[in-house]
Image (cartoon, rainbow, N blue to C red):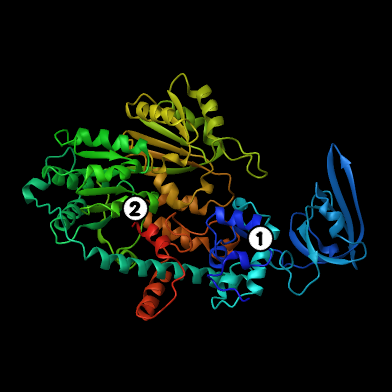
Amino acid sequence: MKLSLNSSLSFVPGVGEQTLAKLKAKNIHTVQDLLLFLPLRYEDRSHFVKISDLKEGELCTFTAQVTSVSSFYRNHKSIQTANVKDATGSVKLMWFNNKFILSSLKKGETYLFSGQLGKYKSIIQAKFEKLSADSIHTGRIVPVYSASLDIKIGNLRRILKNIIDHSQIAEKWLFTLHFPDQESDLIAAREQIAVEELLSLIHTAQQLKNKWQAVENKFIISAKQQDVFPALPFTLTNSQQQAVTEILENLAGKNPMNRLLIGDVGSGKTIVAALVARQVLAHQLPVALIAPTKMLAQQHRASLKKIFPDLDWENFHIGTHRIINQLAKIKPALIIYDEQHKFGVSQRSPVQNLKQPAHILTMSATPIPRSMMLTIFAHLSLSKIETLPQGKDIQTFLLSDKKRADNLEWLSHQSGQSFYICPFINQSTTPGFESIAAATDKYLELKKILGKKLRVALLHGRLPQDEQEKIAEQLYQQQIDLLVTTPIVEVGIDLPQAQNIIIENAERFGLASLHQLRGRIGRAGQKAYCFLYSNSKKKERLKYFCQEKNGFKLAEYDLKHRGAGNIFGTQQHGFDELKFADWTNLELIAQARQKYEEIKNTDYHFLFAPRQTAEILGN
């Protein structure tokens, strides 16, 4: 039987009942599903050398004959060894607790081996397989998969190879994504799957647009111009005023609004949404504002109450995704999503089942050019806040370890609130990650150093929910001076009075994430400072971040400098909405747009299901 993309994995050689159950548990049911489970990274094991040319720390592949195999115990651990040779010399190989070695390596036979020579002139945990013209574990660019499937990586490779050997699939580039012959082939295949994802998005957006345009607006909201912009404690930018006007025109139209409001971090999207909500509430109609975290929802409510104390707060429902389950009862005329991509389709589905479809306003800080937004998000109207409010002044510095003491001394004399960001919650025991800053350890350290001058607190995602909420309330009431935390605050906290942020191991963050974190400070227009520490020897991108404040330019820089060389790393995209493509790859988006015009009226097979693409599109 020849396999197709829709074939059940039960027909794939090597997939038994246990493996099938593990795959189904991860919602992987078909050949296509598994082919789209891409490698986490790749190892180039195609570099062949002689044993005499092995260099310490360098990943190499060599062909050698086994001269001996043995096993012994040391400190209650089973250790397997093998000596292998070629015409230029010999080398010792070692494995731990792997009795499989004794039956797999046969004395006198020749194998392909891959590994790194250690400082004791032996190779630990070498990969190997029998000499073959069709090797999958050594002698080539080898895929390395996430352990999330609970299937041994070697077994997963064999299953995928069996799919390739027993299929009649036209999309051969899908095979290349798993077993590329060379790096350039992999780059081309990665571009191909990104285009396919974009094509599916564009197609789904067109379908959604047609569906939305057939719905009648049951909540017509009219507003006199003089009532739209009340007296505020700050001046709106022209972009903010334009966005409000565009949205209100939508609310009075013949179809329900489905609009996307985009603007850089700190551009003032929330106040635009609040002004629109004010008009709806004035018509005595309910409004729901849905935030990704309870902490942010609470802060939205508190800050907006200060600005608009006279609003109909009984009709203004602000909360997390739990509100979605209450929409049938609330019967909102307007639903506002703060970063809608944070909510899954299953969470949002009740919105589509409302008896009277509500107006939808989505807010996002994803930096996408207008022309591309209109292509991919064809089902949405678009408002964009182009300029930042005057007075937002954040200076960013990349500091060396020598400056730590001075930096903390300076921090101890600051009157505003500060964040201290660590990548991990607890210290990692994984080799190579021991030096990554952990919030729990850093909290104890800073409490000891600064505790007499500053009120120091710790916040991370593993704390009980009630404790997280308590800390958030203390923050908002300015009862905390220094919050030691993780990237949980990237979109989870709106603290107008925060003016300093220190980020440890900044090299571990994409520039988009760093930009979001930096956007947590200076939100009331006060002078603010962002300090970065990094263990990386390559600091060019962080230096660029220190100089650049535009979110789109930062995302574009990350894309340009990611380069082909990073196909062997784990970073596959810039934002969590897209799995394979990148919002900032304008050339690829233009390519997808052109191709869609060519195939939109054909029976083209779109690789990604409407449900998958609808989730990305926010519907």
Picture coordinates of residue 251, whole percent (x, y): 16, 55
**Residue in the picture at 25% in, 47% down:** 389
Picture coordinates of residue 403, whole percent (x, y): 52, 35
Pick whichever, 546 or 424, lies toward us: 424
Q: CA distance from mark 1 to mark 2?
A: 34 Å
- Classify residue 598 as left or right of residue 437: left
Q: Which one is earlier in the sequence, the residue at label 1 or at label 2?
A: 1
Q: Which residue is mark 1?
A: 156
Q: Residues within 10 Å of mark 2 (few under 14, many from 20)?
A: few
- What's under tag 2, amino acid-wise? Ser
* Quadrant in which the N terminus appears: bottom right
Pick whichever, 250 or 45, lies toward us: 250
In which quadrant of the rendered view does residue 159 lie? bottom right
Pick whichever, 518 or 343, lies toward us: 343
**Any part of residue 284 in sight:** yes
**Residue in the picture at 19% in, 49% down:** 333
Quick one: which residue is furthest to the top in this view?
Answer: 452
Picture coordinates of residue 203, whole percent (x, y): 36, 70
- Classify residue 394 as left or right of residue 49: left
